Image (cartoon, helix red, strand yellow):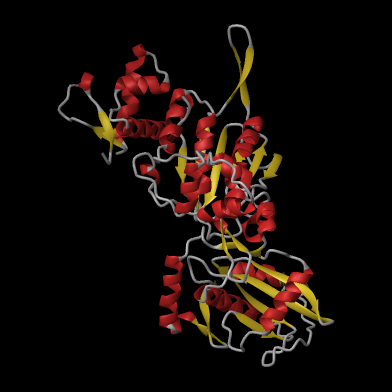
Amino acid sequence: MTADGGQGYFVGLTRELCKLPTETEWVEFKVNHRNPQTVGEYVSALSNAAALHDKVHAYILWGIEDETHAVVGTSFSPAAAKKGNEPLETWLLRLLRPRIDFRIHEIEVDGKRVVLMEIDRASQHPVAFEGVEYIRVGSSKRRLKDYQEKERALWRVFDRVSFEDGVAAERVSSEEVLRKLDYPAYFDLLELPLADGREAILHALQSDRLISSGRAGGFDITNLGAILFARNLADFPHLKRKAVRVIQYRGKGRTETIREQEGGKGYACGFEGLIAYVDGILPADEMIGKALRRSVSVFPGLAIRELVANALIHQDFSVSGTGPMMEIFEDRIEITNPGEPLVDTQRFLDTPPRSRNEALASLMRRARICEERGSGIDKVVLEVELLHLPAPLFEVPPGFTRAVLFAYKDLADMDGAERLRACYLHACLRYVMRDFLTNSSLRERFGIKENNKAVASRRIRETVDAGLIKPFDEGAGRRFMKYVPFWA
């Protein structure tokens, strides 16, 4: 993203790009060339070349003569361009993998019309168009697989540069940094005294990699700084879609929406506001105490907090065009994030946490938004058990991770899969607490009365038969039998 999206900035940028050598591999000049196939191939080649040359963006400019870089103007109109009946931009986005952001600006330079396409650099994977990865070699566009040395170099770049260190806004003035980032929230959440003066504030932000010194002057706001502390994520176009969406439906399906809200702030400075908003719209039951009635949420607040934090931290930021989403139904909450988990869903309770975004996770932990020790899922399962709710469900739709919390359901109304999942997660929770699943502990988990031990025994037997738990000691007497997860 650029620091200033106005015409003046892009006119100045065009003049700078025209001064570059003719064989700059991350910039392409055209006059009226408008073949959609060629444009798509160039987007792939330039995006990969920008990553290889450590540039934040690549560019295609129409209205510039290729050999002389003279401004001659263009009749090309991207808004009117189509491939078949499909708008050009939509068609390009559909065929690029992984999907990357590009933005098209129509400007006037020296009285002549110029079109500038600003393309984000490749990150984590080479960008392909229609399944083929391209690269620039000098001023030529070539297939990446035919240049193995460049391909190896590109993968080395991906291994070296994390999402967090990527640039969300470049060449930003110190005033713009303080306007775009919620720096008071940074000091407050990290329990630091507010630095005295602008220079001290900027130094603190830079020490935590929220900003960096720009090579062309001013500062660059990193993805880490923007995604965590943006006052408004809309200021950073390629991160706007990473805002959390909260959708509340009527009933149990998605046919009727009650309300939909998209977050505007960064994850850290906006987290408490997000949780408060969700808490305010959750369905509640009325409980009568000794003197007063009070409303109690159908879903445990701590469990929601942990699952939302997990979705933010563990998402795959290379999946463009989508972000974390929270869907609220009358009988459940579904929290979905882009990217499949790095850990088997059956081992969420016992496996040490792994994150794609270590710097982001570290700052979220320091801000006390998520767990330092990776015990968040343990807390989710414990909260659910204390309220005798159905066990949470962790599932992996293609390309995504989803956690589901369910409202109360009597044991007799749970289906076989729900009973097995509850029994298995209970065994996992007991095991990480250095304890065992027993008939007694399972009765407590489900709220089964002591005179109904046979009900608990049947649930245990079903889970053993399903291969999810096993006896700790095969030779123990029936009354003293203890059980552990299958992997223990």
The reply to whether residue 325 is visible in this rendering is no
Q: Position of residue 198 (x, y in %)?
A: 64, 52
Residue at the top extreme of this rendering: 290
Residue 420: x and y, percent?
38, 33
Most extreme residue toward the bottom is 67
Q: Residue furthest left?
A: 475
The one nearer the camera, 129 or 212, is 212
Depth check, front residue: 260 or 448: 260
User: Relative to the observer, which residue lies in front, 253 or 428?
Assistant: 428
Decide: is 311 above or below 377.
below
Count of numbered labels shown in the rendering: 0
Q: Nearer the viewer, residue 272 or 339?
A: 272
Name the side, left or right, on which 207 lies relative to 5. Answer: left
**Position above or below: 322 against 459:** below
Residue that protrudes farthest toward the front in the picture: 196
Q: Looking at the image, is 70 positioned above or below residue 459?
A: below
Residue 321 position, x and y percent, is 61, 59
Quadrant of the rendered structure where residue 1 is? bottom right
User: Where is residue 482 shown, x and y percent of the image?
Assistant: 24, 26
Which image quadrant: the C terminus? Answer: top left
From this viewpoint, is residue 285 visible? yes
Residue at 46 percent of width and 39 percent of height = 393
| Drawn side of residue 79 relative to residue 133, left or right | right
Residue placed at 38% from the left, 34% from the top?
425
